[in-house]
Amino acid sequence: MKNHSRLERQKQIQFAVGMAALDGGKPSTFTQNLLHQYENGQITSSQLKQAILQKYAKASN
């Protein structure tokens, strides 16, 4: 598990949200909450990814 500073995590989030916005996307409330937890170091990037995959894989089945 890599340790990232809060500033690095903020930059990663801004980049990801910006890329999604280029395609007209906007993070859901669920995703925004996860991003906030990631930014604060409460969850890892792996946990963030897993939670999103679990949430939206269920929605598409």
Image (cartoon, rainbow, N blue to C red):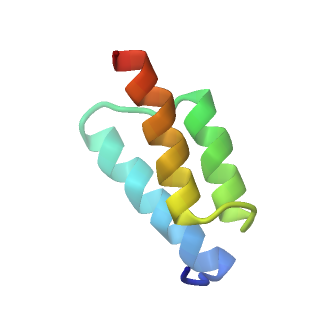
Image quadrant holding the N terminus, namely bottom right
Residue 12: x percent and y percent?
47, 67
Up the image or down, 53 lies above or below 10; here it is above
Viewer-proximal residue, 35 or 17? 35
Relative height, residue 55 to residue 50 (above, below) = above
- The image quadrant where one finds the C terminus is top left
User: Does residue 49 appear in the picture of this structure?
Assistant: yes
Residue 47 is situated, as x and y percent measured from the top left of the image, at 57, 56
Residue positioned 48% across, 35% down in the render: 54
Depth check, front residue: 8 or 60: 60
Give left or right: position of 44 versus 16: right
- Outermost residue toward the left in this view: 23
Horizontal side of 50 relative to 36 (left or right) equals: left
Query: Quarter of the image holding residue 15?
Result: bottom left
Residue 4 percent across, percent down from the top left: 59, 81
The answer to which image quadrant residue 8 occupies is bottom right
